[in-house]
Amino acid sequence: MSENVTLLDKTFVKYINSADIDAAVARVAAEIMLEYRYDDPILLVTLNGAIVFAVDLMKQLDFPCRISCVKISSYSGTESTGTINSLIGLNEDIRGKRILILEDIVDTGRTYVHLHQMLTEAGAKDVRIATMTMKPDAYKADLPVHYVGFNIPNKFVIGRGLDYDGYGRNLPDIYQVVTD
Ligand code: 5GP
């Protein structure tokens, strides 16, 4: 894949290559195995962005687990709107279950806080999160972020599930926006 990509009105430069992402996913999978192997957890995939991370990760989890999906949106273009929209909700009984949220990116943490509250109210035994990327400088929540592939600067990224207005999710590498 090339070093630069242009999507709509923006140019992005390659930032993390695919092989390094694979290695980070393998490391995170090993950490998750240690914590959950006897607990029959539910992996909660946040659509659409976490699809790629979830698929990569699940193939490496060698223990009984199930997946479920929710769809939540707070972004428009390259900006967080500050409002969380639940587009597809949780449709199963999670009472007494351990829940591991799978995210493509944790930015301000608003989505995570919203999900954590929803899952706790629904009776989850405990709620943790595994994210492919995290922006520590943007994070404003008090909840711990348990499993992190990469800590990245507070700049907009695409690829590996992450989109710019719907485009770029299919790129195997992660790209960072070139600011003008
Ligand atoms: P938070 O609620 O933590 O502020 O934001 C989480 C959501 O914002 C992510 O699931 C993702 O949809 C979106 N987001 C935050 N930063 C980025 C970014 O750099 N690139 C992309 N493509 N989405 C982002």
Image (cartoon, helix red, strand yellow):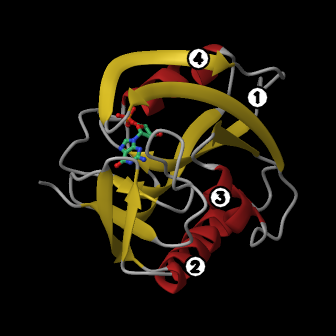
- Residue type, mark 1 in image: Gly
What residue would you read off at disc 2? 22
Of labels 3 and 1, the one closer to you: 3
Of 101 and 14, the residue lying toward us: 14
Marks 4 and 1: which is nearer the front?
4
Q: Kindly report the distance in space between the C-alpha atoms of the residues bearing marks 4 and 3.
A: 20 Å
- Amino acid carrying label 3: it is Val
Residue at the spot of label 1 = 96
**Residue at horizontal 49%, vertical 73%?**
173
As measured in the structure, the alpha-carbon distance from the residue carrying label 4 to the one carrying label 1 is 23 Å
**Label located before the other in sequence (4 or 2):** 2
Q: Which mark, by number, is residue 86?
A: 4
First in sequence: mark 3 or mark 1?
3
Marks 1/2: CA distance? 32 Å
> What is the x, y in percent for residue 160?
54, 62
Q: Residue at x 83, y 52 (%)?
A: 65
Q: Amino acid at mark 4?
A: Ser
Could you tell which of marks 1 and 2 lies nearer the N-terminus? 2
Contact, CB < 8 Å: mark 3 with mark 1? no
Classify residue 177 as left or right of residue 129. left
Q: Is residue 150 left or right of residue 86?
A: left
User: Measured from the top left, where is residue 106 in percent x and y?
Assistant: 39, 45
